[in-house]
Amino acid sequence: MNYRDDAARREPEWLTLGQAARFLGVAQSTIRKWSDHGRVPTFYTPGGHRRYRRGDLEAFLARSGRGGQQTGPPVLLVDDDERMRELVRLELEREGYDVQEAASADEGLAAIEARKPELVVLDVMMPHVDGWEMLRRIQERYGAGAIPVLMFSGQVDEEGVRQAASSGASGFVGKGFDLDDLVGQAKAILPL
């Protein structure tokens, strides 16, 4: 028996939700959604936990042409509110974008260094370094307009809209917003 055969035997046939999400290269909430809609076969343990057969996930990758990666344009979503990030990410992924998340401006800037997105969706109100400062740093490092930035905020006011335009942001959406508006602006800035 060679090393490769031994390694194949050690890989589990059944994967947990977290393992399956890593295998497919998506968030756990994304694979949950796919399971709920019947796109990925799911089995439940007597305790109600989801399990995924490795072969089913490989077949899903082959059918979808994903190869373990999202196929849509890469988008970076930066917001310190985890629940808001999940809500926005799910909507953008549903439209076909490949969404990466960051919980702070520093995480977002590091994510841009690692993999340059085609669009940044950026919360204005964050602790330590706010969205306006992050926008300034993106422009300073990559050039104004090199990476489109769609700003969003907890408030809709004329000043925020003016500041977004004067700061070089590609768009501005109030955070108490209709998600359709945010997705519509993202699609206008970065068509699929």
Image (cartoon, rainbow, N blue to C red):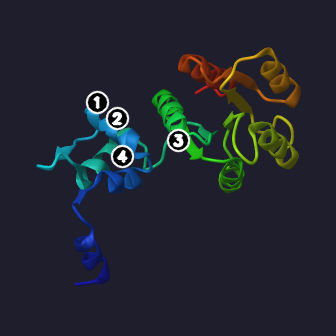
Q: Are marks 1 and 4 in contact (CB under 8 Å)?
A: no
Query: Pointer 3 and pointer 1: residues touching (CB < 8 Å)?
Result: no
From the viewer's perspective, is the residue at label 2 or at label 4 nearer?
Answer: 2
Q: Position of residue 149 (x, y in %)?
A: 73, 33
Left or right of residue 35, residue 72 in this image: right
Q: Which residue is mark 1?
A: 37
Sequence order check: which comes first, mark 1 or mark 4? 1
Q: Nearer the viewer, mark 2 or mark 3?
A: 3
Residue drawn at (33%, 36%) of the image = 34
Considering the numbered disc 3 on the image, is that residue within a helix, a strand or a loop? helix
In the rendered view, would you say 192 is above or below 107?
above
Specify which label sits upstream in the sequence, 4 or 3: 4
Position of residue 12 relative to residue 57, above or below, is below
Name the residue beneath numbered marker 2. Answer: 33
Q: CA distance from mark 1 to mark 4?
A: 16 Å
Q: Is residue 15 shown above or below 119?
A: below
For the residue carrying disc 2, how many other residues have a C-alpha within 10 Å: few (<14), some (14-19), or many (20+)? some
* Image location (x, y in percent) of residue 113: 71, 55
Instruction: Give the label, 1 or 4, closer to the camera.
Output: 1
Per the image, the residue denoted by label 4 is 61
Q: Where is residue 162 drawn, in percent x and y? A: 84, 20
Q: Nearer the viewer, mark 4 or mark 3?
A: 3
User: Do tag 4 and tag 3 residues touch (Cβ < 8 Å)?
Assistant: no
